[in-house]
Image: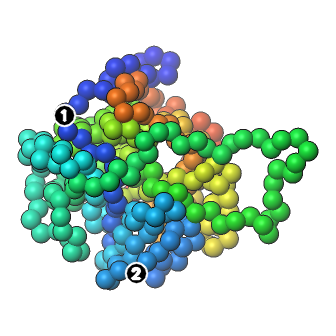
Amino acid sequence: MNTNGAQPGTAAAGPRYAVHSIDHYALEVPDLAVAEHFLDAFGLTLRHNAGWLEAYATDGHCWARFHEGEHKRLAYLSFNCYAEDLAGIRQQLADAGAAFVNDAPHGQAGGIWFFDADGNLVQVKAGPKTSPDAKIKAGLESTPAGQRGALVRSQVQKVHPRRLSHVLLFSPNVPNLVAFYRDALGLRLSDRSADIIAFTHAPHGCDHHLLALVKSSAKGWHHAAWDVASVNEVGQGAAQMANAGYTRGWGTGRHVLGSNYFFYVLDPWGSFCEFSADIDYIPAGHDWPTGDFAPEDSLYQWGPDVPDYFIRNTEA
């Protein structure tokens, strides 16, 4: 390992076919009214649809669905691919040993349904590319001389996430699950820290991570990260959640792997939603210098101490 953990030339190799985006994720939670209060405070637009709750960002896309269930868990994760790649991905799934599913949950028909190596239910379907095609500029410009840089508190607008950035799952075997998503869906390893945590991206132009995985004794849902325009909006998002009664979380800080500014707010079920700004971007065809970073040098560059409940898997 060198001084920054970088190993050039290790991210480009992969199977021929690959997904390009997350379409949405679906969680089961005990009470949709509780979910609605939390998600509205977070700044998402909510719609009720046939017994479930849909969450939209300002880009107009439905990024998340919430269904009632006995306890919080990932119902399924849905990826999009190009239509011409779907048959090839189906073959890659078969070659990777995926267990195919005939009956889609919650009436969500279409595409290919299967269980991943940890038993998470996953959908792949032909659909639009929702991941960005280029690095999105963060609003970090300084105020010119002679102008006031900050609004008074009464004029601060509510933060509304622009899009979903990524999700993070707990896994009892991170390297095994990384290999599965590489071989089956074409996701490339961006960076990792031993067998503790790994970050993967889609090869068609993608944030530093689309799907992240962290070690636990069981599978589970850790967080969804939502893109906002600036580190200022990260801080404002933390304040608006505290004002709504959601005071527990971690941040504001800056990550090392992905480089994004963050604030994680604890949701009502023991997992998190993250306000995220200015994450690294990996262009299509770029040979990202994949790194293996020491645990103490991989999580965050600056910020408050990590709370003891941050890596607690409430589903274990």
Residues tagged 1 and 2 counted as in contact (Cβ below 8 A):
no
Q: Residue furthest right?
A: 146
Q: What is the x, y in percent for residue 135? A: 50, 39
Q: Amino acid at mark 2?
A: His
Quadrant hosting residue 49: bottom left
Residue 251 visible to the viewer: no
Does residue 256 lie above or below 89 as drawn?
above
Q: Which residue is mark 1?
A: 16
Does residue 315 lie above or below 71 as drawn?
above
Quarter of the figure with the C terminus: bottom left
Q: Amino acid at mark 1?
A: Arg
> Which residue is at a point 88% across and 41% down the rendered structure image?
145
Q: Residues within 10 Å of mark 2 (few under 14, many from 20)?
A: few
Q: Report helix, strand or loop for mark 2.
A: strand
The label on residue 48 is 2
Relative side of 64 to 263, left or right: left
Residue 173 or residue 185, whichever sits in front: 185
Q: What is the x, y in percent for residue 96? A: 12, 42
Q: What is the x, y in percent for residue 4? A: 49, 22
* CA gap, disc 1 and disc 2: 39 Å
Residue 10 or residue 316, whichever sits in front: 10
Quarter of the figure with the N terminus: top left
Does residue 227 lie above or below 182 as drawn?
below
Q: Of label 1 and label 2, which has the lower sequence position?
A: 1
> Which residue is at a point 52% across and 62% down the rendered structure image?
58
